[in-house]
């Protein structure tokens, strides 16, 4: 799996952890192991420009997803397509780009009472699910997408604790983990 993380935001972000989370989400969703994903972290000015250009909405937003290849992930509770199966096409896919604004994430994290990295993890997961075709336009879609998002994040955090990889966060962004 090719996961490219580019941090152009001017904010320090744990890029290795973010790449690990992205890999976890893609693995759990049964995405082809040769799929490509790009995660771009940008500042508020760049995010505002993207938000206006692509969504016709003013101001910066937290996350945008720009899908490239159309993928059909398994439905919640279903089994992922096997590599090389007719459903997956047997081909690696260029998933697309997830664009995150850490400055907006930091403000949201403060309001939610958890750390900025926890919020960035949530936004990355959310963006990947959008790339895979999930949406939250109606109540049923919202429940399905956010339930899946919560399960993926909880599994990621549990795995990190088991591996000893969940180091306590300190500083102004420290706080309890997001509810999972």
Image (cartoon, grey):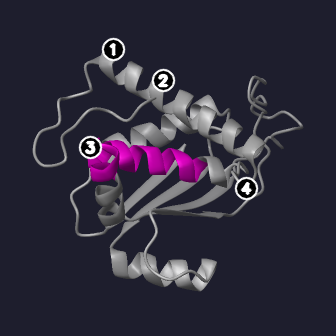
Residue at which label 4 appears: 137
Please name which of the two marks, 1 or 4, marks the residue nearer to the observer: 4
Say which of marks 2 and 4 sits in front. Answer: 4
Which comes before the other along the chain, label 3 or label 2? 3
Q: Do callouts 2 and 4 mark residues in contact (Cβ within 8 Å)?
A: no
Is 2 on the left-hand or right-hand side of 121?
right
The answer for how far apart the CA atoms under marks 2 and 4 are is 25 Å
Discs 3, 2 touching: Cβ within 8 Å: no
- Residue positioned most to the right: 86
Give how far apart the Cα atoms at labels 1 and 3 are: 20 Å
Q: Earlier in the sequence, mark 2 or mark 1?
A: 2
Q: Position of residue 12 (x, y in %)?
A: 21, 57
Give the structural element (helix, strand or loop) at label 3.
loop
Q: Is residue 98 above or below residue 172?
A: below
Residue 115: numbered disc: 3
At 33% across and 73% down in the image, what residue appears?
Answer: 43
Dot 2 or dot 4: first in sequence order is: 4
Kindly report the distance in space between the C-alpha atoms of the residues bearing marks 3 and 2.
Answer: 18 Å
Q: Is residue 62 magenta?
A: no
In the rendered image, which residue does mark 2 sit on? 155
Residue at horizontal 26%, vertical 53%? 13
Q: Are marks 2 and 1 in contact (CB under 8 Å)?
A: no
Left or right? Give the position of 134 relative to 175.
right
Q: Secondary structure at mark 1?
A: helix
The residues colored magenta run 109-128
Per the image, the residue denoted by label 1 is 162
Lower sequence index among marks 1 and 4: 4
Q: Tag 2: Cα neighbours inside 10 Å, few (<14), some, or many (≥20)?
A: some
Question: How many residues crowd around disc 1 within 10 Å: few (fewer than 14), some, or many (20 or more)?
Answer: few
| Position above or below: 66 against 177 | below
Mark 3 or 4, nearer chain start:
3
Q: CA distance from mark 3 to mark 4?
A: 27 Å
């Amino acid at each position: 799996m090719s996961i490219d993380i580019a941090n152009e935001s001017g904010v320090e972000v744990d890029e290795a952890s973010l790449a690990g989370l992205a890999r976890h989400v893609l693995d759990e969703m049964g995405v082809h192991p040769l799929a490509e994903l790009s995660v771009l972290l940008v500042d508020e000015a760049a995010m505002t420009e993207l938000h206006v250009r692509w969504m016709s909405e003013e101001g910066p937003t937290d996350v945008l997803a720009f899908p490239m290849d159309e993928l059909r992930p398994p439905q919640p509770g279903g089994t992922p397509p096997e590599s090389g199966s007719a459903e997956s096409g047997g081909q690696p896919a260029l998933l697309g780009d997830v664009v995150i604004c850490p400055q907006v994430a930091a403000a949201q994290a403060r309001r939610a009472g958890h750390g900025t990295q926890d919020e960035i993890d949530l936004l990355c997961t959310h963006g990947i699910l959008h790339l895979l075709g999930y949406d939250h336009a109606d109540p049923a879609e919202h429940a399905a997408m956010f339930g899946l998002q919560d399960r993926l994040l909880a599994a990621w955090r549990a795995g990190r604790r088991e591996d000893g990889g969940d180091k306590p966060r300190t500083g102004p962004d420290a706080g309890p983990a997001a509810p999972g």
